[in-house]
Image (spheres, rainbow, N blue to C red):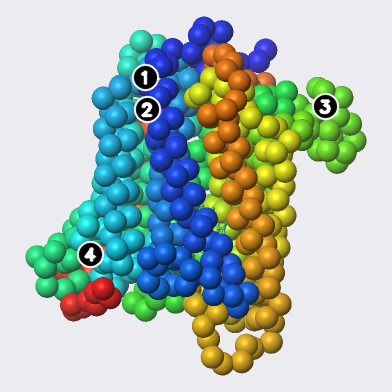
Amino acid sequence: MRTPVVDRPDAPFALPNLQRRIISLTVYLGFSALGVGVINGLAQALNYAGIDIFRYYPGLRTYYEGLTVHGVFNVIILTFAFANGFVSLTTARGLNRPLNTGLLVAALVSLLIGSLLAAGAILSGHASVLYTFYAPLQAHWTFYLGLAFIVVSTWITSLNIFLAVAAWRREHPGQRIPLLAFISACTYIFWDIASLGVAVEVVGFLLPWSLGILPATDPMLDRTLFWFTGHPIVYFWLLPVYISWYAMIPRQVGGSLFSDTAVRIVFLMFLVIIPIGLHHQFVDPGISPKLKFAIAFLTFIVFLPSLLTAFSVMYALEIGSRRNGGTGVIAWFFHLPWSDPSVAAQLLAMLGFMLGGITGLMNASYTINLEIHNTTFVPGHFHLTVGTAVALSYMGIAYWMVPYFEQKDLWNRKFALAQSWIYFIGVLIFARGLISGGLAGMPRRTAISLIDYPKPPGWFEAGIMTGVGGSMMFIGAAMFFFEIFMTTFFSRRTEIPDIPFTDTIEPPAAAGFAVNLDRFRYWIVAAIVLCVIIYGPVIGRHIPPNFISPGNANY
Ligand code: HEM
Ligand SMILES: [Cu+2]
């Protein structure tokens, strides 16, 4: 017997049109940020090829202003907006009940205010501090306030999701939460705990410091709080995509998920293993080498849920392919519906993620980390993860979601397919360039096109690949926006009543241990305990904070 991952799969989707519209605007806000982000990406890629086109960007003062725009718009505004919109949608479908309209609007308004404040500060040259905003580099207070509003928008979204789940549970006592709603709620519970680090950093220290209320700040404490959130944030980018890979793609290829329980365990593992951000501080002073070693080990453990995902999703794909006549040990993979742009984009995103995962493991290895730290190896790695696994999946999801939002056909399927392939081939060349450059010591976050010393061996070829691949990515991204624009304004009207969702072959258990998976409070307690064990001693050394750095406002 197959079990759907949503409540009442055959009933019409109970999402009011107004809520669908608000969710769509939230997602579009994210995609607008991506548009601004990739325009700067092009100049950065060409920079590594030795070509300076920044000078033609109107109003842009420095390389770092452009790089800050790229980082903040792509990995803070785009990702948060997409998560807020998409996960609201999946929660509503999972429970088949409407959300709270007021909270949907409040989250969107908070996100919009935050984005405008941050964008205003960056684009007026008052916050060229990169998306990591390390103290003692100081930005204008409006930048930090903007970040705070952006984070608050995710908390409002959480509240909306949790209220819906709680109401559903009251109406369905003793029943398992439908899988789609479970993984949606888990994503936001995870993020609420993970975001506390950066919330304390921004509201407790950086904002008062930039306003002059605090005379100085404690940069080591700020960094530690930043990375408390900065590691798990990558899973907040990723988990909405996992929701699609687990609960939607199997359906889109005609397959089924195998095990309900395995999926719940994967999401709970992400929830519990939050506190490993110290692996971003392997080269920082003041943290014991023993702890660094322990964290390196824990980091490898967090690879486990991603491996589980790889196997579960592959199996779901294989089931789909074989149901439709796919055969062979590997040949079935080519029998998947590659002509469906939504599927193709996400399959390519998964392939990119394999390379991203492998290079991520390399980063996590303590000794290799020392070798590649702050080289272009790092952006080479994460354009395969967030820049492809996440961003290209968003595009693939958009290929069914924008038609659903607008109740229109996708404008041109072949064009959309070409879009994904160009982006994907582009990123392979681009990342190969940055990774090999990094191994040859090429630094990241550097205006290479302006250097006046001869390039060390390996940098030239690496830079050319970065420039060529990055330009292809830019073309791929531009084609995405064209496709979405044409779909929204010039495509045929049609009726799309529902969103895709899959079913599972092994149903959720009605009794036994697995029932405890739905008792979020156990897992929240486990997560908090682990955070306290690992971060307690590190943060404890900074209490009271050592406010030694008056800071440096570079504007
Ligand atoms: C047209 C597509 C893109 C191109 C050509 C591009 C290019 C680049 C390059 C060359 C860098 C390194 C700059 C440096 O270290 O000096 C970079 C950094 C970065 N990119 Fe991209 N990128 C693209 C899309 C994306 C996407 C889609 C995301 C995420 C969703 C992303 C996230 C980032 C982040 C977070 C950084 C680090 C910024 C920093 O070091 O502060 N990029 N990008
Ligand atoms: Cu990390």
Residue at x 56%, y 62% (from the top left corner): 42
| Amino acid type, callout 3 | Arg
As drawn, is 3 to the left or to the right of 284? right
Name the residue nearer the viewer: 522 or 404: 404
Residue 286: quadrant of the picture: bottom left
Q: Residue 22 carries which label?
A: 2
Q: Which mark is residue 322?
A: 3
Q: Label 2, label 1: how many angstroms apart (C-alpha)?
A: 6 Å
Residue 35, image x, y percentages: 49, 49
Local SS, label 4: loop
Residue at x 53%, y 70% (from the top left corner): 53
The mark that comes first in sequence, 3 or 2, is 2
Indicate which label's residue lies in the foreground, 3 or 2: 2
Q: Is residue 342 above or below residue 76?
A: above
- Residue under circle 4? 140
- Residue under circle 1? 18
Residue 137 in sight here: yes
Residue 174, image x, y percentages: 41, 14
Residue 437, image x, y percentages: 64, 76
CB of mark 2 within 8 Å of CB of mark 4?
Answer: no
Residue at x 70%, y 38% (from the top left corner): 415
Residue 473: quadrant of the picture: bottom right
**The C terminus: image quadrant:** bottom left
| Amino acid type, callout 4 | His
Name the residue nearer the viewer: 287 or 39: 39
